[in-house]
Amino acid sequence: MPVALLRACLPRAERDELLADLLKEHAVLAASAGRGVAGQWLWRQALHSAPSLLGWSWRRSITGFEPRANTYQPGGFMLKTFFADARYAARRLRARRTYTLLSVVTLALGIGGTTAVFGVARPLIFDPLPYANADEVVTFWMPGWWTEEEFLYLRDKFTGFRAVGAYRPGDVTMRQDDGTMRLLPGRTVTSELFDVLGAKPLLGRSFQTGDDVQGAEPIAVISYGLWQELGGKPSILGQRITLDDTPRTVVGVMPRGFWFPDPAVRIWLPKVLDPAGRNGNYELVGRVGPGENVNNMATPLSRLTTVMHERFQYSAKADKTREPKVIPLRERLLGSMRPAVVATFAAMALILLIACANVAALMLGQVEGRATEMAVRTALGASRVRLVQQIVVEALIVGMAAGIAGALIAAAGFRLLATALPIGVWGKSTMFDWTMFVVALAISLGTVLLVVFVPAVSLWRGDLRGAMGSARTGGIQGRGGRLEQGLVIMEVALAMLIVSGAALLVRSVSRLYDINPGIETPGIAVIDVLSSGQMTGVARRQKIEEVRAALAELPGVHSAAAAIKLPLRGKGDSFNITIEGRENEPSSYTYFRVATADYFKTMGIHLKSGRIFGLSDKSDTTGGPVVINEALAKKYFPGEDPVGKRIMGGFRGTWQVIGVVANVAEAALTDDEEPVRYYLGDRTFWMGSNASFVVRTSNDAVAIGMLDVMRRTVGRMAPDFAVEESTTMSRVFDAAVGPARQIMALLAILSALALVLGAIGIYGVISHFAARRKRDWAIRVALGLPGSRVVQHIVGQGTALVAVGVAFGAVGTVALSRLLTSFLYGVSSVDPVAFAAAASILLVIGAMAAFIPAHRAGSVDPALVLREQ
Amino acid sequence: MSPASSPPLGVFEEQVLVAVLRTAGDAYGMEIRREIERVTGRDLAIGAVYATLDRLEAKRLLSSTRTHGDGPSRRLFALRRAGAKALAETAAMRERLWKGIDVRALVRLAGA
């Protein structure tokens, strides 16, 4: 009872501490003097305290005094006013639905987009590599050019390095329980690799010295993902799996999150190294020794090249020791993807900034619209801190709502973005997780600060009493609004950056599509297969022919062919060439392709002179036929007819040129013309274990529909072939156009977003101007100014703002377009056409956005306005 | 002998300020009440102590901060410069007031 009395009289902030102390004292007293005495004491305390406490509360309510120590207490100043402000802001936001919705959606798009890009970029840019002290790990120059012979000779001569290992692509087929083949992306590695990376297996062991020498037991280390697919049991160690028809013992499982050199790789195999192995597309990776500096490896490298030169006596043309250098592993593995991700990230951050400017302008409009209310509150004693606090609370509510919506947008858009960006397997392996929500929230908090800054400054500086005065007159001199104008200019400038970036890419990509690859891409379906490494050449040739014939029989197929490598997919093999009668000339190399007879017909490669392979060539035994391209004819047979000439090199024997075909973009779309010779698969052997089947159909839609049947046909005819990829030549062409195409698509979408946001900003600010000067216009119209002049003036004002923004943006674009240089082809990064296009798009959209409020202002009845005021 | 510059403290206010000084470092409401009770021997209502502490802080003679330990956080008080000055002035005033008065004679008189 006495406690209840005290509780009723005490201020909230002090209640708990005082009652707790009082009850403690009461307990001490009860223990020493008895409960009765203590009870009396408590009553006396309550009754004597009540008048003072009531007086205290009354005084606080009159003076408004609140000790600083109570600021963050329940019932204290900050929290009390915070909740009051939050309630008020929520009420205001509910009442202004369009404003609220526009702000939340605008910010959510920016936050969601930025979060999603961050999610995709994180493993590529921010996450550490899954190797111990990854900074010490480097790759060597000439990636993909090292041979087994070179590596074995140099193995113990890498001074300055703790360890050096080699690896090369080594996809293998795995026979599954149902007898079908499955392709496993893998790497063939030397025993040092895992030591170089400093990676410890989760189970079992990695490779050790002796695993890659003659007579070693065939073993494999598998990825966590593959282990899970194979059952995820520890008993996997020691188990045998059949890879390329060879049983191999699994000796280790790498931990979850480990990848090398990309997340698609599921298996690592040691290879028995051949000390005389001349070919081999190995890449070297090493860990620098103690005391060595990754950035200063010139001395160890020069020692290495001296040794190499002494041993291998490279010719001047093929001197591998010319530019020795080491490349940080991160740069080598992820560097190529960085520009695309950074450009997208930059564009997304710009969108977020535009969104912030937009909402800041909207909020500024709200603040100005509330000038009278603010002035009244100031007159009644509200401090500026309180007024600013109120806007901050409002912005916080909007920001948090946008943060939540943004996180949802990010979750939905993440996968889309991951596949849209040119980051290959990384797009498939990145995962969306809860940290993204934290990021979204952090971004939205930052956004709130950005958004609220301008209105808060305007409120802080603003002459509020003046606002109250001018509210009555309707603000005839109400010009001002410089902050709003500044925001719109900034928005337009930022939009200009994105739009001109997109325009640059559109131009660049359209140039790439204009290139004639020398083949008729539409309507070609492609199936890539990998045959078991154990298959003999004759068996493979037979199988390929059987599958090709079966494919040619499929309904809708005009012709079918096979080749070891298709155009637009990288260099492939080169071999030396010698012309009969000119054996003394220095040897040189040309691309080298093996294909079936119908290859040219199926791919749409035009014959220029002579003939292409025919039925008779299959049985002909006197000399092999070879078809060359125009570039080869031009380089080796200038001014003469190459048909009938004979060449040597590569395959044994002499080969007669039977025809010349048009140049084809063999390796990359933008390459110069390259000499190529084509051999008939029936007369030679199919090198390597890769082959591609192509069929010509009437169009791409048919080709896409054909892929499944083709895949099944391959599975039925040749269970030993694992299907690597099924695609169409048009998609291969798209891939050859490269990352620019994908970045262009993304930037185009972002540009559209930037334009919409920019238009909203311009519309908002201009309508606000027009509304504020309504009375002004009304008087002029009443005095005889035609409405069209009003429209003209307001649209002019809007367009002028856009023009200033475009000018600022153009300056920024010149500085920022360097980000895009690596994607540009045939276009300068300061391309006037792209800039002009971007500027005119922005000007047109700006004028359109300004026209709506202008039209409204011009068609208003002056009598109505003047009476209103 | 300079005249006092701030308004004179009430007796209870003076007691509370001195108690804050005496309990320095541990000067929260209940401890201050105990200290005054101990010195004056009078029963004192906690409400009066709190109300006075608050008033003294409003007059900027005291400042308070929150301590966080076990149980509810407490307001811990400390003398501000103005409080110290007011207390010093009050003490000086008392000294002047009692100057020349024989306290022992007074006690004797009271006992008579």
Image: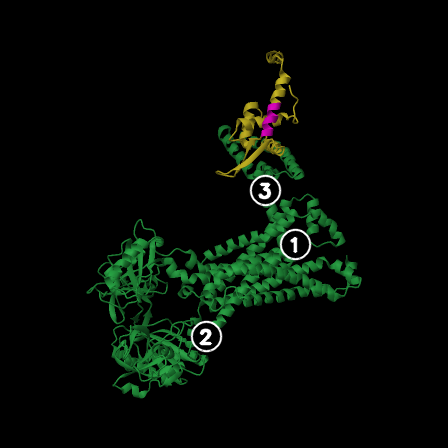
Mark 3–mark 2 distance (CA, rounded to whole Å):
72 Å
- The answer to which of A49 and B19 lies nearer the viewer is B19
Name the residue at 51% across, 28% down.
A33
**Quarter-wise, where is residue A351 in the image?**
bottom right
The residue pinned by badge 3 equals A76
- Judge whether A64 appears above or below A586 on screen: above
- The answer to which of A507 and A285 lies nearer the viewer is A507
- Judge whether B96 appears above or below A522 on screen: above
As drawn, the label of residue A515 is 2
What kind of element bears circle 2?
loop
The kind of residue on which mark 1 rests is Arg
What kind of element bears circle 3?
loop
Q: At which x and y percent is residue A296?
A: 34, 52
Q: Chain B is drawn in which colour?
A: yellow
Judge left or right: residue A27 versus residue A455: left
Question: Which residues lie in the magenta part?
Answer: B81-89
